[in-house]
Structure formats: structure tokens, C-alpha cells
């Protein structure tokens, strides 16, 4: 018995060696699915655990609020809100920075540190150096990311315009905070550590600089377990309203946390969507290959049974083959997945500034990967294995009947045309095995679709950039003010060096409410005939600010369950805090930063103010840009300068670093699937038909003519799969685009023709490549032995 | 028959083989399949090659058919030196001059009888029509049947029709009746005999079945890679008269 098992195992390994190319292709497709699963879920685990650990360690707050100014005594009232466990009041301020190595301005977010001890909430982890001394008002802690972006470290200093005064700040410590893991500056779409930095200063020093002695303008709080967040927020808003509160919000709406959680969710989605597809393709390939092996080994199977092996023993021979392919795929997938996961985590450390744990071996993920790949293996292989086990020895030993063909309707249709016999052979073979042909088509089509879906992201982002940066927001920069200013400030800006054109804007923080649904947003006041910052409809035509109502982003309308013509309750969260019912007169398709828009005069009327602005959009002559920056840096009352070009550059850079890596990876996977499917189809066709092809060679057909018969079929299937794949890719992208939308971005559904083109080209190249490889095998056909053997 | 004279007429040579040697070397193992074979085949004759397995007759047939090249020696088909041909020249030689019939028919299962024959007529220079060829083998009523719908004997006759449709100069048959019962075998041999007579095709037929030798003009016996005897058959029998 031992002898038998040994020789059967030897046979198994020789069979495997014979089909090594196909075996590798199957295992690799399977490995891709496993790798995606392991890297996605592994990274999700790392991000989640690291986030929770960091939040716990730094006591990240549950509720946040900003206001104008409230006396310290209000803190006790806040503490009395039921469900609140810790309250911390702070002073925060946005300042313009004057950095030695930058002509253009940068923005700093100053946050106060308690005079004694560490913050109760949102602790700053000091990586290097120390906390500022209460004796020295110029000492600050800055984020590690900001310092390294400027090549600064502990002991270095730089200047900032604090409440109109230029002051020198000395770095005494480098830190990390849970509030700015994803450090978005004002008006930015992507983190930019050069233009935006978070810095901490002693409470007394910061309060003194902004005339907030004995007062605060920021509250953070932790809640007791089981407390109602909504109720706490409602009560806090009531308390803060007289002090200029602009609406408090929960952790889930905290910007940095929002991005991090959103990223984790997206990663989890892609980890659940893609791997099953790869595993299905692998299962299909496995089925085709093992079925073929069983078919060619009929006589051997008959022989085993004649020797006295039972059905189970015979089935086990082929089941082992399936299992080996599954385990090789699983092993490669785990290795690849760990490697990819490591790369993804490194990528995340560039954008998310918090200590990330190592990608560990997660037994849960590994076990599910193993179970899922085994299921895929069984789905694909079991049918063929059963075929082998059930084969009766007498049938197996008898010479096989030629594959039966019938003249179907298709073949009668083709009979009208004069087509050569080789071409007829191709068509007959395709139509004889419609299931297999369809599966091959689906497999190749899927790789086309995967390519289209990956490249669709780029098309979509390019459209966003085109519309947002080149059609909607055409200003060079936007100057925003600390306080609303009289509209006449526009003339002052017009006289600054390099200013070509200006446009005023008025932003107001509001809560939009429809019944129980509400959302904190801004209403942006727009001037008619605006040329720099324009409101566009979905066809990129300019929308004039509606005189009698609100133009609302479709995204917000959907969230608040509002439609055109509805009245929306607008609760202004600043100054006199008016509340009004305003009709929605227009819905706007926006890709980035969803807002509500009104005529600027209507905003001023709403606020019961004369002509007022909160910012000026400016188009700048680039030759004088540095002079303008220098002037603006020293201008009191300027809260920040948002530069479109810098925003675009960091947007593009982020896309290059993150998206392109992922897309490159998906393109590689798509090519691999196309190759795997096509190669298997070609090899199976060759194996089934080598005798027929050798006969043709003997009859005087040239190698090229014979290759045509073999690869013509592959060509036809590939050709059919291209439009199918384009359609599938179109549908998948269409389904995908709303799934990717967040509260900040919308992925427009755009597929450029070049995306179809590239997808088709890459898949065709894969198919041609495997054609070339198979062609070498056709050329090497042994004519003499083909004649001697029967099928 | 080295002088090539029969009934006082000088016959035209189809093949002339001189010192044909074929050595297979696989993994250090050296097998001499043919050891210096000299042979001439004449136009229009039907010869039977007899001999045990491994005696070299199939190897010789493959070399005559341009499927393989000898290790040493010279082989001429009429004026064409096959031993000096490239692989492509050999393909063209097969296409234009040779008809093959195999033991296992080697029909294309996806093509009907007519289409299997058309496979060859489409690439030949001066072929007969597919239906004509099938009529010669008595299958004019089975034109549109696929191989799976035909009996073994019918399949072999389709194979013969396919081989003769191009009006080949030579017809090479390797155990054409090997997979058939005697009654069916005779029908197949009749088809071969008719092609040989009506088209004047030089025909070489390998068989294990000594009974078949009676329908030939010459019987060539092989052993150990060499020709051990060449016998003329004075009384050529019709296939129907054969028994085995």
C-alpha cells in the first residue's frame, strides 16, 4: 500500500509539473484575491487598532465646539450638562506664518496648553523636546510633520503674525495630536505639511495675545458611557449661543476623524468586493484544467480502477491536485498580501500622522482567507474530481468516441457563406462548448472591466480638477478675514501689487434643517457676473446667483431629503443668529466641498448687514506674487490665504502617491487575469486538439495555418470579450461612483475613450503574449507520435 | 526488381532511397530504427510493408512522407531530394504530393465528411471535388455526417477520400485496417485499391496482416531496421478475394 501511495504521489507531481504554467496562472489569480483580502483587512485592522489605541492614549474628545468668547465661569455650566464627564476649555487661533524658506504664506493653528500639567483631552504626545514653559510666552510645540516639512527641529524659531503683531516663536517640542491625524488646513483638500501646521502655546500667552484673558473660545469634552451625544450637543449649543457659538459637533464629524474613519470604511469595502471576483476566476480556471486532466487520463483512471482502487482513492488523486493549487495560491497570497499590506501602511503614514502598529499576523483574517480559497477550490475542482471518481473502468478503457458535433442553426447560417474549413473548425469549436467559451469571454471581459473601473478613478479625478480648479475656482488665491469686513475692502486689495482681478465673497456658518434632519454648512454669497469663483451646473454652464432663494448642492439636498422648491430652515450660527425659511430654487452638481449659495446681497439681508465680505478671491500676476504675499503676510485682519495652485499641486501629489499606486496594482491584476484566462484557454485548446492539429500538419498545412486554427478561437473569444468587458466596466464604474462619494468629494461618472482604449490594448497585449507562447508549442508538435496515439 | 523493368517496360521511379539510416537518441539511449535501407518505388505500384513492431517500416513510411528526416542517406522523390529539404519545403511536399491514411483515421471531429475532405482540396493544386472523392470510397450518401455519426469503417473511408482528393502522387497508409474488423477492412482496402488503379497513385501500405500482401505488386519485409526481402506477387488479388 505504501508503495502504491508513493507512486501515485509521484504521478501527481509529474502531472503538476506537466501543467506547471497553467497551475501557476491559477495559483497566481487565486493569490491576488487572497493578497487583496489579507492586505485590505490587515490594514483595516492596523488602522482601527492604532486609531483606537491613539485615541485612548491621548483621550480624544467626544464633542467639540468653537465660539467667539466666553468667560471661564461658563465652564461650570457646561460641566453640569447631564452625561458630560470631562470638559476642557481652550483658546485657539489661526495665524499667518512667516517662514524663512517660503515666499508664499502658510497658516498655523494655535492651540492653548494648560498652564500646569497635560491637556485633559486631546493630549499632545511629545516626540522630542518638552512642553512650553509658562514663563516664556514665545515657546511652542509644533507637529513633527510641520517641523520636518520645513527642516526645523527643537531650538529653531520662525515668525508668525499674531493678532496683527509679528512675533518670533521658538520650537521647544515636537508633538502629535489626535485632532490632526489628517491635517487639513483651511480651504485645503489635501494635507499639506508645508502650508499648514498645528502648534501649541501656553494658555496664558495665547490668551494674552488674542485678548482672551479669563476667557475661552474652544470647548472639548468627554462624555460618560451611554450619554446621549445629541442631547449634550443640543444643550451645549444653547449654552454657547450668547457667546458666539457656531454649533458644536460630535467626534464623527470632527474633520480628521471623519477622513480616517472614511478611509477605513472604503478599504473595508474594496477588501470585500474584489477578492471574490478573483477567486471565482480561479475556480473557473481550476475547473477547466482539472476536467481536462481527467479527460486525458481516462485510460489511467480505468486502469487504477481495474487494479482495485476504489472511487474514493481515485478521487483523492485529483483532489490532492486541486488542494495543492489552492494551498500554493494561499501561500503566495499570504506572502503577497503581507508585503502589500506593509506598503499600504507605509503609504498611510505619509498622510495620517499617528503611530501605526505593525501589520500583524491576524489569525482571523488568515483563517477566513484559507476557508474562502478552499471553497473556491472546491467549487472549481470538485465537479472534475467527481467525474474521475465516477468513471466506470470499462468505459474508461474503451476508445473514446469522437467528440460529437451537430450542425446547429449557427452552423447552417454560416453554410451560406464560403468559409475555409479551418475557419469553420474555429466556429464549430466555439459553439460546441458554449459554456466554456462564455466563461472564457467573461473572464477576459472581467479583466477589461477591472481595468476600466481602475482607470475610471483617474478620469473622474481629472474631471474634478478640470471643473473645480479651471472652471469653477479660477482665482489664484483667496484672502479670508478674521472678522467680516465692509465691502470696500475689495478696493484696498485691488491696489495691492500684482492684483489683476478681484471678487468678493461672503461666507456664513449655518445649520440647514429639514424636520429632524440637519447639517452644518456654509452659505456662500456670490456676486452676479462673477468671473473668478463661479457656480456651475452639471454641464459646466455658469449659474447666476439666484436672487430669491438658495442654490443647494445636490449632495446636501439628498442628505436632508430636500427637493427643488422645498423650504429649508436656515439657522445662522453667528452674529445675530437669524433663523429663516428659504426656498430652494436651484440644485447644483458639485464635486468638492458641498455648500449652499445665495446672491451676496441676499446673504447681507439675511444677516441684517450692509455690504459685507468675509473674503476676496484674487487673480494675481505671477511676476508680482512674492510682493503680494509679503504684503498680505503683514496685513492685520487677514485670517488666511488659500492658494489654488498650491492646493492643486498637493491634490495632484496625493493622487500620484496613493491612487496611482492602487491603480497600477489593479492594472497589473487585470493583465494577470486576462493572461491567466487566455493562457488556460489556449493550453486547453492545444491539449484537446494537438492530435487534430498534428494531422493537419501531416496533410500539408503549414505551421502558421495550424496556429491560425488554434489561436483563431482565442482571438474570436478575446474580440467578443472586449465590448462585453467595456460594457461591464461601464456598469461597474457606474455602480461604484456613488459608493465612493463622501461628505467632501463626489466622484463624477466620467469614462474617457482613452480609458476604454488602454483597457482594450492591455488585455489584447496579454492575449497576444499568451498566443505567442502557445504558438511555440504548436511549432513543437510531434507529428509522428500524434498519428500513433488515439485521442 | 532492382532494374525497374516490368513487362518489358521501363518504369518511372517515384522514390529512390539510398543508405537510409535513422537513429533516435533519447536520454543516452541509442535506437537504430533504420540501418542502411536502399529502396526504389515505382509509379503506380502498390507495395505492402510487412514486419514486426519496431522493425522500421513506420519510420521509413514517415521519412517517405516527409514527416521526418533520416540521420544519414539520401532520399529522392522523383527529382526532388527530400533529404536536402527544409521543414517548409517538406510541408509543401506533403501538401502537393502525399496522401496519408492512418490507423486511427485522424479525422477532424468538428468537420463533416465533406468538410474533412474539403480541408485538403482547398489547399491542393488540382483536386477533385470533395463529393467526387467521397463517391470514390462509396460514401456519397454520408456527405454531411460528422465523424461521431460514422462507423469506424466509414471514418477510415472518409480518411482515404481525404487522402486521394488532391490526386496525390503517393498514398502512404499506416495500418489502415488495424482498428477494423475484417469485413469492414476489406471495404476500406477496396477503396485504396480503386484509388491506386484509377488515379495511378504509388501506394505503400504498412500492415501486420500478412493476408493483405496478396493485393500488392511487391511485398517488402522488414526486420531490425533493415529490408530482409522484397518479393514480387505474380497474381495480384482483388480485396474481395482476401481473407484473414
Image: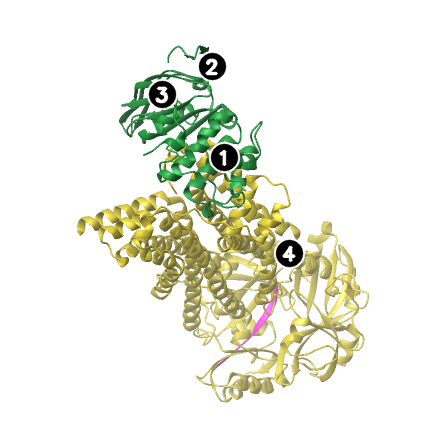
Chain colours: A yellow, B green
Residue receiving disc 1: B161
The local secondary structure at tag 4 comes to loop
Can you tell which of label 4 and label 2 is closer to the viewer? 2
Can you tell which of label 4 and label 1 is closer to the viewer? 1
Q: Residues within 10 Å of mark 3 (few under 14, many from 20)?
A: some
State the extent of the magenta-drawn residues as a range. A87-96
- Whether labels 2 and 3 belong to a single chain: the reply is yes
Q: Give the residue at x 32% y 34%.
A: B244
- Give percent across and percent down for residue B26: 30, 29
Residue receiving disc 4: A751
**Which chain is home to disc 4?**
A
**Which chain is home to disc 3?**
B
Looking at the image, is mark 2 or mark 3 earlier in the sequence?
Answer: 2
Quarter of the picture holding the C terminus of chain A:
top left
The local secondary structure at tag 1 comes to helix
User: Height in image: A325 above or below A206?
Assistant: above
Please give the label number shown on residue B233. 3
The local secondary structure at tag 3 comes to loop
Amino acid at each position: 500500500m505504501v508503495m502504491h501511495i508513493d507512486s501515485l504521489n509521484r504521478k501527481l507531481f509529474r502531472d503538476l509539473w506537466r501543467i506547471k504554467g497553467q497551475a501557476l496562472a491559477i495559483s497566481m489569480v487565486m493569490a491576488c484575491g487572497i493578497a487583496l483580502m489579507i492586505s485590505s483587512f490587515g490594514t483595516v485592522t492596523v488602522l482601527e487598532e492604532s486609531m483606537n489605541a491613539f485615541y485612548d492614549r491621548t483621550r480624544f474628545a467626544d464633542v467639540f465646539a468653537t465660539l467667539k468668547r466666553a468667560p471661564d465661569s461658563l465652564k461650570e455650566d457646561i460641566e453640569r450638562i447631564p452625561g458630560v464627564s470631562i470638559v476642557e476649555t481652550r483658546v485657539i487661533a489661526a495665524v499667518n506664518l512667516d517662514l524663512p524658506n517660503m515666499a508664499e504664506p502658510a497658516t498655523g493653528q494655535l492651540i492653548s496648553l494648560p498652564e500646569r500639567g497635560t491637556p485633559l483631552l486631546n493630549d499632545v504626545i511629545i516626540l522630542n523636546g518638552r512642553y512650553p514653559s509658562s514663563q516664556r510666552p514665545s515657546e511652542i510645540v509644533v507637529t513633527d510633520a510641520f517641523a520636518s516639512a520645513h527642516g526645523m527641529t527643537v531650538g529653531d524659531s520662525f515668525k508668525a503674525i499674531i493678532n496683527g503683531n509679528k512675533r518670533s516663536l521658538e520650537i521647544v517640542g515636537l508633538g502629535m495630536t489626535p485632532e490632526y491625524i489628517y491635517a487639513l488646513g483651511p480651504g485645503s483638500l489635501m494635507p499639506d505639511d508645508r502650508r499648514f501646521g498645528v502648534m501649541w502655546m501656553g494658555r496664558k500667552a495665547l490668551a494674552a495675545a488674542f485678548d482672551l484673558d479669563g476667557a475661552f473660545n474652544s470647548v472639548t469634552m468627554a462624555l460618560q458611557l451611554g450619554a446621549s451625544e445629541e442631547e449634550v450637543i443640543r444643550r451645549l449649543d444653547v449654552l454657547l449661543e450668547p457667546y458666539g457659538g457656531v454649533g458644536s459637533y460630535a467626534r464623527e464629524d470632527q474633520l480628521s476623524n471623519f477622513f480616517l474613519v472614511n478611509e477605513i470604511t472604503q478599504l473595508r469595502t474594496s477588501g470585500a468586493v474584489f477578492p471574490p471576483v478573483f477567486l471565482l476566476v480561479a475556480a473557473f480556471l481550476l475547473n477547466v484544467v482539472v476536467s481536462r486532466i481527467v479527460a486525458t487520463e481516462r485510460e489511467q483512471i480505468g486502469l487504477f480502477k481495474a487494479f482495485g482502487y476504489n472511487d474514493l482513492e481515485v478521487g483523492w488523486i485529483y483532489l490532492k491536485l486541486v488542494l495543492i493549487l489552492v494551498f500554493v495560491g494561499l501561500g503566495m497570497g499570504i506572502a503577497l498580501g503581507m508585503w502589500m499590506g506593509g506598503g499600504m501602511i507605509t503609504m498611510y503614514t505619509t498622510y495620517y500622522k499617528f503611530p501605526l502598529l505593525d501589520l500583524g499576523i491576524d489569525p482571523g483574517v488568515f483563517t477566513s482567507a484559507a476557508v474562502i480559497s478552499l471553497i473556491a477550490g472546491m467549487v472549481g475542482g470538485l465537479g472534475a474530481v467527481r467525474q474521475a471518481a465516477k468513471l466506470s473502468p470499462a468505459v474508461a478503457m474503451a476508445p473514446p468516441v469522437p467528440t460529437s458535433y451537430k450542425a446547429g442553426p449557427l452552423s447552417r447560417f454560416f453554410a451560406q457563406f464560403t468559409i475555409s474549413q479551418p475557419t469553420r473548425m474555429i466556429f464549430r469549436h466555439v459553439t460546441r462548448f458554449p459554456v466554456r467559451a462564455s466563461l472564457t469571454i467573461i473572464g477576459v471581459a472581467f479583466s477589461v472591466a477591472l481595468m476600466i473601473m481602475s482607470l475610471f478613478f483617474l478620469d473622474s479625478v481629472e474631471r474634478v480638477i478640470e471643473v473645480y480648479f479651471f472652471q469653477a475656482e479660477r482665482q489664484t488665491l483667496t484672502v479670508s478675514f478674521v472678522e467680516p469686513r465692509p465691502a470696500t475692502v475689495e478696493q484696498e486689495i485691488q491696489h495691492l501689487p500684482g492684483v489683476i482681478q478681484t471678487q468678493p465673497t461672503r461666507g456664513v456658518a449655518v445649520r440647514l434643517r429639514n424636520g429632524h434632519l440637519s447639517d452644518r454648512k456654509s452659505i456662500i454669497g456670490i456676486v452676479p457676473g462673477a468671473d473668478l469663483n463661479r457656480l456651475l451646473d452639471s454641464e459646466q454652464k455658469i449659474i447666476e446667483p439666484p436672487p430669491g432663494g438658495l442654490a443647494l448642492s445636490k449632495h446636501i439636498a439628498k442628505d436632508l431629503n430636500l427637493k427643488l422648491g422645498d423650504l429649508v430652515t436656515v439657522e445662522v450660527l453667528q452674529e445675530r443668529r437669524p433663523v429663516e425659511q428659504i426656498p430652494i430654487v436651484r440644485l447644483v452638481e458639485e464635486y468638492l466641498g458641498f455648500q449652499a449659495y445665495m446672491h451676496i446681497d441676499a446673504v447681507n439681508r439675511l444677516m441684517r448687514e450692509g455690504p459685507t465680505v468675509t473674503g476676496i478671491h484674487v487673480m494675481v500676476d505671477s511676476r508680482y506674487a512674492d510682493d503680494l504675499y509679503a504684503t498680505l503676510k503683514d496685513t492685520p485682519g487677514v485670517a488666511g490665504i488659500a492658494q489654488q495652485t498650491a492646493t492643486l499641486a498637493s491634490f495632484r501629489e496625493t493622487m500620484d502617491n496613493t491612487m496611482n499606486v492602487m491603480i497600477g496594482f489593479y492594472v497589473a491584476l487585470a493583465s494577470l487575469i486576462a493572461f491567466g484566462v487566455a493562457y488556460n484557454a489556449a493550453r486547453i485548446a492545444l491539449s484537446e486538439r494537438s492530435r487534430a492539429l498534428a494531422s493537419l500538419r501531416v496533410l500539408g498545412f503549414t505551421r502558421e495555418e495550424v496556429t491560425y486554427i488554434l489561436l483563431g478561437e482565442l482571438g474570436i473569444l478575446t474580440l467578443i470579450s472586449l465590448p462585453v468587458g467595456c460594457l461591464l466596466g461601464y456598469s461597474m464604474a457606474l455602480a461604484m461612483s456613488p459608493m465612493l462619494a463622501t461628505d467632501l468629494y463626489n466622484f463624477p461618472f466620467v469614462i474617457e475613450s482613452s480609458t476604454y482604449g488602454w483597457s482594450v490594448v492591455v488585455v489584447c497585449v496579454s492575449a497576444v503574449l499568451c498566443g505567442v507562447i502557445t504558438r511555440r508549442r504548436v511549432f513543437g508538435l510531434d507529428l509522428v507520435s500524434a498519428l500513433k496515439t488515439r485521442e | 526488381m532492382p532494374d525497374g523493368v516490368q513487362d518489358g517496360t521501363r518504369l518511372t521511379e517515384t522514390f529512390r532511397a539510398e543508405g537510409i539510416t535513422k537513429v533516435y537518441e533519447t536520454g543516452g539511449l541509442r535506437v537504430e530504427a533504420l540501418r542502411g535501407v536502399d529502396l526504389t518505388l515505382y509509379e503506380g505500384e502498390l507495395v505492402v510493408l510487412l514486419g514486426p513492431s519496431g522493425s522500421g517500416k513506420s519510420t521509413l513510411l514517415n521519412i517517405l512522407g516527409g514527416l521526418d528526416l533520416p540521420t544519414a542517406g539520401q532520399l529522392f522523390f522523383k527529382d526532388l531530394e527530400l533529404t536536402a529539404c527544409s521543414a517548409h519545403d517538406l510541408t509543401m511536399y506533403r501538401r502537393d504530393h502525399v496522401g496519408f491514411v492512418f490507423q486511427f483515421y485522424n479525422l477532424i471531429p468538428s468537420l463533416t465528411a465533406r468538410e474533412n475532405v474539403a480541408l485538403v482540396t482547398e489547399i491542393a493544386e488540382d483536386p477533385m471535388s470533395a463529393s467526387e472523392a467521397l463517391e470514390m470510397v462509396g460514401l456519397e450518401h454520408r456527405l454531411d455526417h460528422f465523424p461521431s455519426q460514422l462507423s469506424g469503417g466509414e471514418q477510415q473511408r472518409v480518411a482515404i477520400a481525404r487522402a486521394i482528393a488532391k490526386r496525390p502522387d503517393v498514398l502512404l497508409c499506416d495500418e489502415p485496417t488495424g482498428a477494423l474488423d475484417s469485413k469492414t477492412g476489406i471495404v476500406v482496402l477496396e477503396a485504396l485499391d480503386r484509388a491506386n488503379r484509377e488515379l495511378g497513385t504509388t501506394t505503400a501500405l504498412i500492415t501486420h496482416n500478412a493476408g493483405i500482401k496478396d493485393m500488392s505488386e511487391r511485398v517488402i519485409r522488414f526486420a531490425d531496421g533493415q529490408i530482409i526481402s522484397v518479393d514480387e506477387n505474380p497474381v495480384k488479388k482483388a480485396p474481395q478475394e482476401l481473407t484473414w
